[in-house]
Amino acid sequence: MGQLEDNMSTKRQRWPWSEKDLRTFNAALLGKWQWDLFHKHEEPWAKILDSKYGDWRALEEGTIANQDSIWWKDIISILHQQQNSAIRKETG
């Protein structure tokens, strides 16, 4: 094994989370942002987001513009995943 492979193997052993754990953590964190945006819309940070992307209705409608940040697109994506999951549970 070469030095690069040894280094990668060592990093994998020290990293405590799997890729699935990181995806779940990321989805939970983005979900928290959604919750806060819906329920704390009078906070200064929420007003800034409203001015940049539209109010919480824009988030709920899921409209994405090309100039939107990756972070905003991820929040909308997580919201759509949650809605689709709820629909599947209701019809399943």
Image (tube, helix red, strand yellow):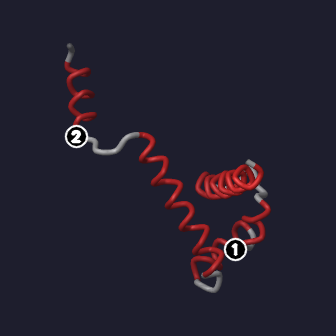
Label 1 element class: helix
Q: Identify whether 8 is placed above or below 80.
A: above
**Label 1, on which residue?**
50
Q: Nearer the viewer, residue 81 or 60?
A: 81
The earlier-in-sequence mark between 1 and 2 is 2
Q: Quadrant of residue 47?
A: bottom right
Looking at the image, do the residues carrying marks 1 and 2 touch, with CB atoms under 8 Å apart?
no
Query: Which residue is the extreme one toward the front?
Result: 92
Residue ID at (62%, 77%): 46
Amino acid carrying label 2: it is Arg
For the point 23% across and 35% down, the residue is: 13
Vertical side of 88 occupied by 12: above or below: above
User: Residue 25: percent from the left, percent from the top?
Assistant: 45, 54
Residue at image mark 2: 14
Nearest to the observer: residue 14 or residue 84: 84
Give the residue type at disc 1: Asp
| Residue appearing at x 53%, y 55% in the figure | 27
Point 74% across, 73% down: residue: 55
Callout 2 environment at 10 Å: few (<14), some (14 to 19), or many (20+)? few
Q: What x and y, as percent, mark residue 8?
A: 27, 28
Question: Going by the image, does 88 lie left or right of 19?
Answer: right
- The answer to whether 51 appears left or right of 37 in the picture is right
How far apart marks 1 and 2 lie (CA) works out to 40 Å
Question: Does 25 sit above or below residue 51?
Answer: above
Query: Which mark lies nearer to you, 1 or 2?
Result: 2
Q: Nearer the viewer, residue 85 or 7?
A: 85
